[in-house]
Image (cartoon, rainbow, N blue to C red):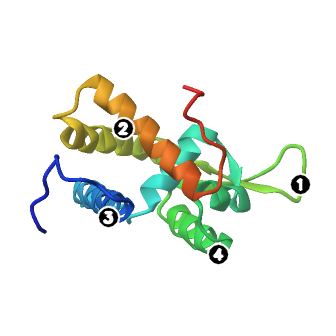
Amino acid sequence: MTEWSADAPADEADVLIALRFAERAARKAVAEELAGSGLHTGQELVLAKLLHHGSLPVARLAKVLDVEVPTATKTTQRMEAAGLVRRVKSATDARQVGIELTDRGIELAHTVQQIYDRAGRRALEHLTPEDRRVLRNLLWTITGALEGLPSAAGSE
């Protein structure tokens, strides 16, 4: 990778390329930390979302993860076979089946959170708390713009 200069002008392509490289480096750092955990890349996101949201139908989980339903189905089947998630019938609609974490899945979800914390500390160690806040807000603004959402810049 070519050396960059913080003082050089940054056009739109430069910014998106830097974002792509940062995302790639973040995925690599997390994957290295996940090695030996028994999780496949992407499954940690399922654990995190289910820990946050609780039980979700596969279609809703797919939407939350921004993947296709067959992908979410296959992933949750693998995770179910590994004892990380289970299927549960809805108490209000017998036709609905949700996916929820098992005790082992909850334990691993907390481990994943620690992995993300370590990788995040490494990634952001040279940024001040204000830099982090600004970066977070800019990233969410960029995400919203690319996904066609209204700007959230004023809703801090």
Marks 4 and 3, how far apart in space? 30 Å
Labels 4, 3: front one: 3
Of 72 and 127, the residue lying toward us? 127
Residue at image x 28%, y 62%? 21
Labels 1, 2: front one: 2
Residue 36 visible, this angle: no
Q: Is the residue marked by circle 1 packed among few (<14), some (14-19), or many (20+) residues within 10 Å? A: few
Question: Circle 4 sits on which residue?
Answer: 70
Between discs 1 and 3, the one toward the N terminus: 3
Between discs 3 and 2, the one toward the N terminus: 3
Of 7 and 39, the residue lying toward us? 7
Q: To which quarter of the image does residue 15 belong?
A: bottom left
Amino acid identity at mark 1: Ala
Marks 1 and 2, how far apart in space? 44 Å
Residue at image x 63%, y 70%? 73
Between discs 1 and 2, the one toward the N terminus: 1
Between discs 4 and 2, the one toward the N terminus: 4
Question: Circle 2 sits on which residue?
Answer: 135
Marks 1 and 4, how far apart in space? 22 Å
Marks 1 and 3, how far apart in space? 47 Å
Question: Circle 1 sits on which residue?
Answer: 94
Question: Circle 3 sits on which residue?
Answer: 17
Labels 1, 4: front one: 4
- In the shown orientation, is residue 38 left or right of residue 61? left
Amino acid identity at mark 3: Ile
Spot occupied by residue 40 in the image (x, y as percentages of width and height): 38, 66
Of 13 and 156, the residue lying toward us? 13
Under tag 1, what secondary structure? loop
- In the shown orientation, is residue 18 left or right of residue 39? left
Between discs 4 and 3, the one toward the N terminus: 3
Residue at image x 29%, y 24%? 129
Q: Is the residue marked by circle 2 packed among few (<14), some (14-19), or many (20+) residues within 10 Å? A: few
